[in-house]
């Protein structure tokens, strides 16, 4: 179990799924399979398989596994039921059924709070998961400000509770800090997010005694906030280092590398060299499009970044054309009310205004 969990943590999803399947098949062939306690034990491997499927973006398959596990938990003890409901909320989250996920999670949090002395970590995990759901929910529903108000409220609660209950330096407390920092980044509170991430990063390096994909993700967030607070040189060095690290991943290296290239291009732009930034981003976008088409957000993010550079270079018509070209793909991948759609429409207006202001004045 610990081995497969580590595979998932390191993004080795295919291997995790394969090893989960092997153990499930082996257990099913055992005479003990009819024993209820043994079946509860096997259920842990089914959940690990579901997590591996999540990593492979096979969300419906993972949902079906968890649905079956919840159906089997009617006569089981309350803690097992709560765990399976929490996992079910994960599947609803991946399927972008946010209301259903939050409804289930509400029940889980009530139970976890009653038993906080038995397992404080499960209580904190439920609180932070609620923050993650609200944060993403807002990404897709920009027209509902109450969602982000809830995210802020619950984010601060989770952060405060984690620092109250968990020991300083515990891995879960550090994970809560990362989730809260990500929320602050979404709200463009860059300095506070950078401060939190700096502390998390140094502590994780000490705990882990080495690097892994999770620590690289923290460094990526740290580099992103560095760009926004004006530490362009530091950020560029971090992104170049992260691109090198990404090549060592067995899965997800291309996507992570492209994310680094996007942020590196933005960093070059922040330094004022918009022509260089544009050419760098165009190259990254072309590579991303060859790999993913328009099925990944990174392709659209890169296209948007190129259009922004056209704005800085005063190529307003080109910028507007690029933005209008990607808009249908963004709506299809997200929603009409998503934050991304709002950003594109707002930038088109900026281009139109700049274009009008650049025209010669007539009497």
Image (tube, rainbow, N blue to C red):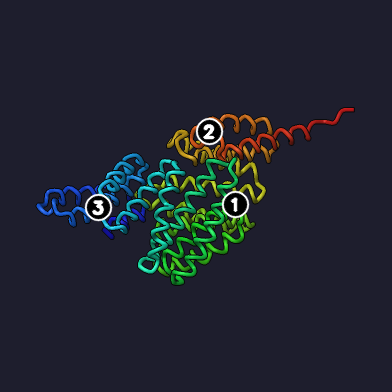
Instruction: Look at mark 1 in the image and give the residue it sits on.
Output: 187
Instruction: Look at mark 2 in the image and give the residue it sits on.
Output: 331
Q: CA distance from mark 2 to mark 3?
A: 44 Å
Residue, x 47% and y 49% (percent of image)? Answer: 133
Identify the secondary structure beneath mark 1: loop
Quadrant position of residue 138? top right
Q: Earlier in the sequence, mark 2 or mark 3?
A: 3
Quadrant position of residue 255? top left
Q: Is residue 237 visible?
A: no
Horizontal relation, residue 302 to residue 166: left or right: right
Q: Earlier in the sequence, mark 1 or mark 3?
A: 3
- On screen, residue 309 above or below 123: above
**Going by the picture, which residue comes out furthest to the right?**
363
Closer to the camera in the image, 29 or 151 = 151
Instruction: Look at mark 3 in the image and give the residue it sits on.
Output: 75
Return the x and y of residue 141 as percentages of the image width and height: 55, 41
């Amino acid at each position: 179990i610990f081995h497969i969990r580590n595979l998932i943590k390191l993004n080795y999803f295919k291997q995790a799924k394969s090893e989960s399947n092997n153990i499930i098949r082996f257990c099913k062939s055992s005479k003990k399979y009819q024993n209820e306690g043994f079946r509860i034990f096997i259920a842990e491997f089914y959940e690990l398989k579901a997590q591996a499927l999540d990593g492979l973006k096979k969300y419906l398959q993972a949902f079906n596994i968890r649905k079956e596990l919840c159906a089997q938990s009617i006569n089981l003890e309350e803690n097992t039921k709560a765990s399976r409901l929490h996992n079910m909320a994960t599947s609803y989250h991946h399927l972008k059924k946010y209301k259903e996920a939050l409804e289930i999670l509400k029940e889980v949090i009530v139970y976890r709070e009653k038993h906080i002395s038995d397992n404080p970590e499960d209580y904190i995990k439920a609180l932070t998961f609620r923050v993650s759901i609200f944060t993403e929910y807002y990404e897709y529903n920009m027209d509902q400000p109450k969602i982000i108000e809830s995210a802020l409220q619950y984010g601060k609660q989770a952060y405060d509770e984690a620092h109250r209950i968990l020991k300083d330096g515990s891995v879960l407390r550090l994970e809560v800090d990362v989730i809260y920092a990500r929320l602050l980044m979404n709200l463009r509170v860059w300095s506070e997010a950078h401060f939190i991430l700096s502390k998390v990063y140094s502590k994780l390096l000490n705990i882990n005694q080495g690097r892994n994909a999770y620590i690289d993700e923290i460094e990526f967030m740290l580099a992103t906030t560095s760009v926004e607070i004006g530490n362009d040189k530091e950020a560029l060095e971090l992104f170049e280092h992260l691109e090198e690290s990404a090549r060592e991943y067995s899965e997800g290296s291309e996507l992570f590398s492209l994310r680094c290239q996007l942020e590196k291009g933005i960093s070059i732009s922040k330094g004022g060299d918009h022509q260089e930034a544009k050419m760098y981003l165009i190259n990254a976008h072309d590579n991303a499009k060859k790999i993913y088409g328009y099925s990944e957000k990174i392709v659209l993010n890169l296209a948007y970044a190129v259009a922004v550079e056209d704005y800085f270079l005063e190529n307003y018509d080109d910028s507007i054309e690029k933005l209008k070209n990607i808009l249908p793909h963004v709506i299809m991948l997200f929603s009409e009310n998503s934050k991304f759609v709002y950003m594109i429409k707002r930038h088109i207006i900026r281009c139109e205004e700049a274009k009008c202001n650049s025209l010669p004045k007539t009497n």
